[in-house]
Image (cartoon, grey):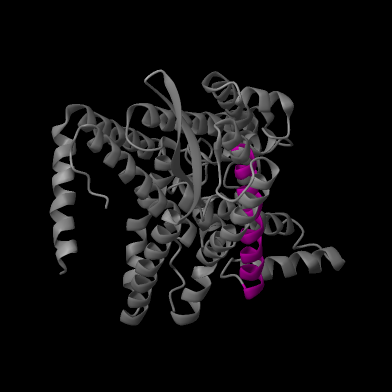
Amino acid sequence: MTTAAASQRPRLLQAMTDAFRQEDVRRKLMFTIAMLIVFRFVAHVPIPNVDRDALNTAFEDNSILNFLAIFSGGALQNLSVAALGVYPYITASIIMQILTPLLPNLRALQEEGEQGRRRIQLYTHWLCVPLAMVQGYGQILFINSQSNVDVVQDFGLQNDVVGTFATLFTLTAGTMFLVWLGELITENGIGNGISLIIFGGIVAVIPGLIPSISTQSLIGVGVIAAFALGLTYLIVYFQEAQRRVPVQYARSSFRGGRMYRQQGQSHIPLRVNMAGMIPLIFAFSIVILPVTVASYFADTSGFVGTAARWIVDQFQGGRGGAGQTPIYWIVLFLLVIAFTFFYTMVQYQQQQMAKTLQRQGAFIPGIRPGPPTEAYLMRVVTRITWGGAFFLGFVAIIPFFIGLVSDVQALTVSSTGFLIVVAVVLDTMKQLESQLMMRNYEGFIR
């Protein structure tokens, strides 16, 4: 063990000890853990009129449903009141982020500061409700279509309207309850609450995967461990990677009744992966959509039925969902790259870096303020985004490479979930580090 590694362990243990000694930090940590326990309890409260045997049949060897179940922390597999997770809220947040620079009213609210952002947050909550109802309706219809017997009895507007709306309201209430828990964690705990809810759901699935991994050969387990370590390193590297653009600014001071202007230096940290994991969620949602639609027409005859069966075979590996073909992974890779550039540009346009620099009297050395600065920053962001886009694309298709070199087919924790877990851990560690540094304790992040 190297000296650095040896010294890092005591620093980490000492930092955790210091965190629990501080009453306010300890209270934040315990509050966060308590809210995650409440979330896991809610994830096991089922909705009414569910046929458990039909539900197990629907999830058997179905790659799409098993993928969705991972991000709900098993709540979807139980069809609990939290089956939708917080993803309708994430969808609503993404929509609001896209609409804000396009609609003048929303753009004006964003420029009002904290009060305007709270108003936009309220609109996001309102938008989340209809999105949760639509997602819940489509999700239950899809689950019913994967079994010979309806999983949720008498569900559908053509059957029991009152019962259908009662089920949808239950699922929507579960989603909004989780959003409320997440916001409580953000305000009173450690870390981003919504991210921690997703993190808790993914981590809760891992113990159930141990039996399927333990049945594999020693070489297969070794391949999984090697991929996990390598992927962790890549995620940390690209999550923390930055391009620092140097910035100079004029600073005025008065001495002896005279004003002096001094030059200060700073930098703009442009992240290589500015889009985070949003492109992965976008891409997986898009590739799931054709299979969902095609499954309704797979039993028909003629050209429509043939095309629907081909889509199901290519994107799901057949009606049973045994595994995807290379076409699926190629389409997924290209979609991730496209969505990475799209979402990065949306994020960049909202920050208005060139205008902010000009307003603060700062400039990039060798670049004139205004449009030239805007064009320069756009070129830099575009170049570094290629690295982030290929990284996210590689993360998305890692399961395909695992399948090529190993016989592991039951490993259902996707690389996307792995990325979310590592990213949330990094963010939470940074916030805990800042809490310790504020109280004059030595941190644990070098």
Residue at image location 59% in from the left, 29% down from the top: 124
Q: Residue 128, percent across and down?
A: 60, 31
Residue 385 in the magenta stretch? The answer is no
Q: Quadrant of residue 301?
A: bottom right
Q: Is residue 136 visible?
A: no
In screen coordinates, is 71 left or right of 376? left
Q: Nearer the viewer, residue 32 or 205?
A: 32
In screen coordinates, is 224 left or right of 353? left
**Dominant SS type (magenta):** helix
Residue at image location 46% in from the left, 53% down from the top: 70
In screen coordinates, is 87 left or right of 201? right
Q: Is residue 120 visible?
A: yes
Q: Residue 200, percent across and down?
A: 37, 45
In screen coordinates, is 158 left or right of 229? right
Q: Nearer the viewer, residue 179 or 294?
A: 179
Residue 345 in the magenta stretch? The answer is yes
Q: Quadrant of residue 435?
A: top left
Residue at image location 64% in from the left, 68% down from the top: 328
Q: Quadrant of the N terminus?
A: bottom left
Q: Residue 316, percent across and down?
A: 62, 66
Relative to residue 247, is residue 178 depicted above or below?
Answer: above
Q: How many marks?
A: 0
Q: Nearer the viewer, residue 85 or 340?
A: 340
Q: Nearer the viewer, residue 276 or 218?
A: 276
Residue at image location 41% in from the left, 40% down from the top: 197
Relative to residue 215, is residue 21 depicted above or below?
Answer: above
Range covered by the magenta-colored residues: 325-351
Q: Residue 289, percent across and down?
A: 68, 54
